[in-house]
Image (cartoon, grey):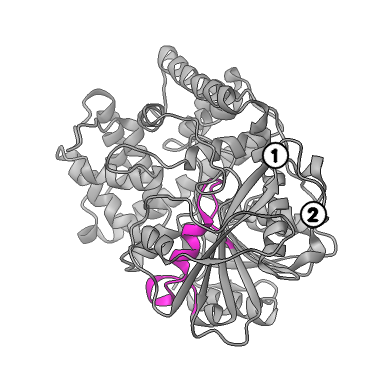
Amino acid sequence: MPRITRLPLVGLVAATLLAAGCTPPVFAPRTERGAAPVPAGSAAAWKPCPETARQVARRTAPSMTYECATVSVPRDWLAAGSPGTGASPSPSGTFEIALLRARSTKQRDRIGSLLVNPGGPGASGIDTAVYLSFGPAFGGLPDEITRRFDIVGFDPRGVDRSSPVKCISDADLDANFGYDPDPRGQSSFDGLVALNKRIGSGCAGRYGDQLRLYSTEQAARDMDAVRAAVGDEKTTYLGYSYGTLLGATYAQFFPRNVRALVLDGAVDPRQDAVAGSESQAKGFERAFDNFAGWCARTAAKCPIAPDARAAVTEAIDKARTDPAKGNDGRAATPGWVLYSVISALYTESRWQDLATAIARLRNGDPDQVFTLADEYAERDPNGHYSNLFDANLAVSCADEPSRPTVARVRQLQSQWREKYPLFGPPLAVGLLGCAEWPAQRDPYPTGAATGAPPIVVVGTVGDPATPYEQTPRLAEMLGVGRVLTWEGEGHTAYPQTPCITSAVDAYLVELTVPREGLRCPAR
């Protein structure tokens, strides 16, 4: 759920590709690329950038070309006017939105651009477009999609290559991830409050009242500037996780500019931060129970069988008093252990990695725990972080209209410990990030996309990050949503099974809406 700042849920598209056998790394060095910025409403000035694909994935995909561009957008659309109107730039200046276009050399009968967003908020759409360009053999998009569409990724404002927001030190991020996920003593809880205050104050000191401009509402208006820049009359969009919220917001603002929207891993925009956090706690507990059940059934593949929950709980408890040291000198404190679990629960293909990591930790070796946790955190081997969590905090807190008090967070921590033993307390204390955020808010709308065509909303029954219950709620809110269900595990569904892939492809290409109530089997 994107509003959570200590546990932001990123659409780990790259991790899914790795699990499918793709050689590119999950995370790669970031760099600014592209032509000189062009004003919103102008055509993008593309230039070749195969080096960007190589930086992200170590190589380029066969039969694919890569081009980059940058579009200037007003920092404050409400002050400058809607995108495409030719309004004057915002008095507060502009942001530069970075784009990458992957185009197949085998393209034919081109429909237009497929705009992609992986979620977060804070994840890079440019990186995602590169990964998806590698095709079905590596977990990427089907050939039919790359033959008919340009795959266009964009980094939303504040993210990675698009005027990135960076205001959290590596040391504070290490402290955040390593902190006890359930600080029971008052002094330990107060220490976490102080850490969140320090982070919030640092970001406010650097960006001031500009922080509210990283909101989803502003980013959705940027999307229409991107539509115009790539030359499409209407938008075709694939959004994962938080990307469903961004897409839903776009559909409310620009319903008549929508051609087709696929929203996979749905977020319910109408739930507040507390409800969203509790929903996620429930989702992760359910996903962990599914993992534990797999362990019990396939003990030969699960070295922590037969009781995976007991093994993980014991590992976290031991890490509080006697944390193992990794090869890089880090102590595998409880937070790192929990984040390794969270990272692995995003996709069923990492369950065996998680079991092995906990088993090795039990024997004093935490390195695989750190590998899993660092993938989630976007922490490189030198201890440096991308700006994923800086952007996540800025966007999530700008979006949130209300905030719980510190006392309320403390109360929820205790209550949720009883209901959701592993994930309730960390999701409760995760609310402290926005509770201590000093900047103004700019909440997104929560209404129907009146005038838009049918929008496909995809949900996965075993999704821990955006629990399935949110799927019909988003579809109902939009008024034009059509639910497509995958009875599988992990975060997001397309293009993981033939049934889901066939239904989504037909919608994207032919605008054939999946039949009402379509449910795709796990296998």
Between the C-alphas of marks 1 and 2, the distance is: 22 Å
The residue identified by callout 1 is 93
- Judged from the image, the secondary structure of the residue bearing numbered disc 1 is loop
Towards the viewer: 375 or 478: 375
Towards the viewer: 96 or 57: 96
Which tag is nearer the camera, tag 1 or tag 2? 1
- Residue 39 shown left or right of residue 147 in the figure: right
Mark 1: give few (<14), some (14-19) or many (20+) Cα within 10 Å.
few
Query: 502 above or below 280?
Result: below
> Where does the image place residue 463, in percent across and percent down from the top left?
50, 55
Instruction: Quarter of the image for the N terminus: give it.
Output: top right
**Residue 348 covered by magenta stretch:** no
Residue 436 lies in what quarter of the image?
Answer: top right
> Where does the image place residue 424, in percent across and percent down from the top left?
49, 35
Query: 480 above or below 342?
Result: below
Residue 35 lies in what quarter of the image?
Answer: bottom right
Residue 164 shows in the view:
yes
The residue identified by callout 2 is 253
Q: Which mark is residue 418?
A: none
Residue 399 shows in the view:
no
- Residue 258 shown left or right of residue 205 in the figure: right
Q: Magenta region: which residues?
A: 116-142
- Which residue occupies 62% across, 54% down? 37
User: Callout 2, which amino acid?
Assistant: Phe
- Which residue occupies 49% across, 73% down? 141
Mark 2: give few (<14), some (14-19) or many (20+) Cα within 10 Å.
many
The numbered mark, 1 or 2, whose residue comes first in the sequence reads: 1
